[in-house]
Image (cartoon, rainbow, N blue to C red):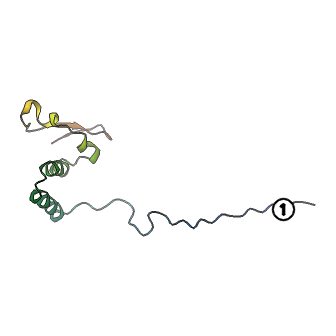
Amino acid sequence: MAEVSSVVAVVSKRVPWNKGKIVGAKPPLRPKHVWSIRTKLQVEGRARDLAMFNLAIDSKLRGCDVVAIRVGDVAAGGYTADRATVRQKKTGQPVRF
């Protein structure tokens, strides 16, 4: 006699972590959102966060490139530079800001 093997499918009751969430790229910030963030940072006196936010918005750098910038990159010798160039990690392209 031939044996019949049966395969039982295991059904998972686990809910996906992103169920009900919007997936994909997020829409860009609108100007009113940018200004509200800038105003909030100014009112709270968070100069460092405001400077990094302005740099990120104005230069269009990725987050990993913004946090990698050091003071010496923009203020060589104690004086603020008018222009600076940073090479992006992902693309390798230079970005001037």
Comparing 77 with 57, the one in front is: 77
- Picture quadrant where residue 79 is located: top left
- Looking at the image, which residue sits at the far right? 1
Amino acid type of disc 1? Val
Which residue occupies 23% across, 44% down?
Answer: 66
Front-lying residue, 95 or 36: 36
Q: Is residue 5 left or right of residue 47?
A: right
* Residue sitting at x 42%, y 70%: 20
Determine whether the residue tagged by mark 1 lies in a helix, strand or loop: loop
Residue 32 figure quarter: bottom left
The total of numbered circles placed on residues is: 1
Residue 95 lies left or right of residue 44; in this view the side is right
Q: The C terminus appears in which quarter of the rendering?
A: top left
Where is residue 42 shown, x and y percent of the image?
10, 57
Name the residue carrying label 1.
4
Residue lying at the far front of the rendered structure: 44
Left or right for 78, reference 4: left
Residue that extends furthest to the top in the rendered view of this protein: 77
* Residue 77 against residue 27 in the figure, above or below: above
Question: Which residue ends up furthest to the bottom in the rendered image?
Answer: 20
Q: Residue at x 26, y 42 (%)?
A: 65
The N terminus lies in quadrant: bottom right
Q: Examine the image and state in which quarter residue 27 appears.
A: bottom left
Image spot of residue 4 (x, y percent)? 84, 62
Residue 51 locus on image (x, y percent): 14, 48
Question: Closest to the observer: 30 or 6?
Answer: 6
Within 10 Å of disc 1 (Cα), the crowding (few <14, some 14-19, many 20+) is: few
